[in-house]
Image (tube, helix red, strand yellow):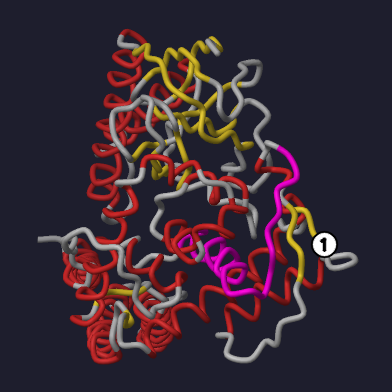
């Protein structure tokens, strides 16, 4: 057996083993599902932002901040007025109430309103940030404060506890040692420049490989993996899901505007936190909007849709001609490398040519076959446009004028993957459209606005 291929195999196996352990850790620590308690109108003591965290499966959504804003109005710190029929005309009026007893994230939202208000009045449309950097910084601080409160109450915990992170670090060190040994063994068998022993160079390369591998693995292990449930958190979440069931029993509740807090009091803020009231969350925006969780009325009922936006798909949104060209080039290079086997007088060249050429040839053939099938098999369906965003998925991060993300809800489920819309096609959020798409490349080939 080729010794160099064996070294590469050891390094690949060590890398795969560590990422396998990492994936297993994420699988084991996923938040467990919660079954709703019987329907009840009894509210608990937990703040709406924490309730939103629990109801969303231990994820923080934009509902948390918006529900907190309504709750501040319910508790007398703010007043929400709607002068006309349109909830978007709602104004926020700051009251001179003492700030004692406010939680850090509640104080942060109240400070934001006071900072923007002129003469104590602020239109809800002026709440959003105009600078993405400021929005992200403010949102990060808000999320951190909400998570801290949930942990203080014993309702949430780190998804990766310190012991698990330490275990992954130990595995990372072990995998890095294997990779470093493989690099050392590989290079130590190579003669140094001008002949002689290459041990010194092999040791330096092995140390570099160890440090780089350990850094990559450790960064992944130490990164914030989000929150997960606790026994107390599941119990409280079940009770609040019972409240959500009770609120859903009131048909008009979903369409109540923010100003209805004067009548419904804290029920409205908790309804927003639980995702029951779509008008409140549609009118109030504290950030730049959550493009990954979008409201849709397609099918006659309001519901949230989770949207995923591909970034690393080589085929995503590309026209057929470009995909065919890439397939032909990849296949050609692979065949050329295989053909060159036995014709290059370089040590181990044959093994390398075959090891690289066969996968490239198979990949090129696969691309060509799938592209032809993609061209022949199209889908046409009606849907509601949820989100439109310029595509910035190039290697250099530059905008691609030929493509933009188009997220639509076709009524098939509460999750979807955004399509790639070529320039020249219409469709704005809220439009009902008829689209023709190529499923594999996820490219829109025709779009007609219906309403």
Q: Horizontally, is 264 left or right of 16 in the view?
A: right
Q: What residue lies at 75% left-to-right and 54% top-to-bottom?
A: 91
Q: Is residue 196 visible?
A: no
Quarter containing the N terminus: bottom left
Give the camera-side residue of 417 and 66: 66
Quarter containing the C terminus: top right
Above or below: residue 157 compared with residue 368: below
Place of residue 405 in the rendered image (x, y in percent of width and height, measured from the top left): 54, 34
Q: How many marks?
A: 1
Give the camera-side residue of 354 and 282: 282
Place of residue 325 in the rendered image (x, y in percent of width and height, measured from the top left): 46, 21
Q: Horizontally, is 59 left or right of 281 in the view?
A: left
Q: What residue lies at 62% left-to-right and 67% top-to-bottom?
A: 73
Place of residue 168 in the rendered image (x, y in percent of width and height, measured from the top left): 26, 83
Above or below: residue 65 compared with residue 442: below
Question: Farthest left residue?
Answer: 1
Does the segment drawn in magenta span residue 5? Answer: no
Q: Which residue position holds label 1?
A: 121
Give the camera-side residue of 19 and 44: 44
Please give the range of residues in magenta: 61-84
């Amino acid at each position: 057996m080729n010794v160099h291929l064996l070294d590469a195999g050891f390094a690949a196996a060590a890398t795969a083993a560590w990422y396998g352990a990492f994936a297993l850790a994420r699988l084991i620590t996923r938040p467990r599902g919660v079954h709703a308690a019987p329907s009840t109108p009894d509210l608990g003591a937990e703040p709406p932002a924490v309730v939103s965290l629990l109801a969303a499966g231990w994820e923080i959504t934009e509902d948390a901040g918006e529900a907190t804003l309504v709750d501040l109005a319910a508790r007398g710190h703010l007043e929400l007025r709607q002068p006309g029929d349109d909830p978007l005309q709602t104004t926020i009026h700051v009251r001179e109430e003492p700030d004692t007893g406010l939680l850090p994230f509640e104080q942060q939202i109240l400070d934001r309103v006071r900072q923007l208000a002129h003469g104590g009045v602020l239109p809800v449309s002026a709440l959003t940030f105009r600078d993405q950097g400021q929005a992200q910084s403010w949102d990060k601080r808000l999320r951190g404060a909400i998570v801290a409160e949930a942990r203080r109450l014993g309702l949430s915990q780190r998804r990766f506890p310190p012991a698990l992170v330490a275990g992954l670090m130990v595995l990372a060190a072990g995998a890095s040692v294997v990779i470093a040994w493989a690099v050392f063994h590989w290079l130590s068998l190579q003669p140094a420049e001008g002949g002689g022993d290459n041990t010194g160079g092999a040791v330096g390369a092995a140390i570099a490989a160890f440090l780089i591998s350990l850094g990559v693995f450790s960064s992944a292990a130490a990164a914030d993996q989000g929150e997960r449930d606790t026994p107390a958190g599941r119990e409280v979440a079940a009770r609040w899901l019972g409240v959500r069931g009770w609120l859903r029993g009131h048909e008009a509740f979903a369409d109540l505007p923010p100003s209805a807090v004067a009548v419904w009091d804290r029920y409205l803020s908790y309804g927003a936190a639980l995702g029951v009231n779509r008008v409140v969350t549609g009118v109030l925006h504290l950030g730049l909007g959550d493009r990954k969780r979008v409201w849709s009325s397609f099918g006659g009922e309001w519901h949230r849709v989770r949207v995923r936006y591909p970034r690393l798909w080589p085929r995503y949104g590309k026209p057929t001609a470009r995909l065919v060209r890439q397939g032909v080039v990849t296949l050609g290079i692979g065949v050329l490398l295989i053909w060159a086997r036995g014709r290059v007088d370089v040590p181990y060249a044959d093994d390398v040519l075959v090891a690289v050429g066969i996968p490239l040839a198979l990949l090129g053939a696969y691309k060509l076959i799938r592209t032809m099938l993609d061209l022949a098999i199209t889908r046409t369906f009606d849907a509601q446009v949820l989100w439109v965003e310029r595509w910035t998925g190039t290697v250099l991060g530059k905008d691609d004028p030929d493509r933009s993300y188009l997220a639509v809800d076709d009524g098939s489920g509460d999750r979807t993957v955004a399509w790639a819309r070529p320039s020249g096609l219409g469709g704005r959020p809220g439009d009902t459209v008829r689209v023709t798409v190529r499923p594999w490349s996820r490219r829109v080939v025709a779009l007609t606005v219906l309403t």
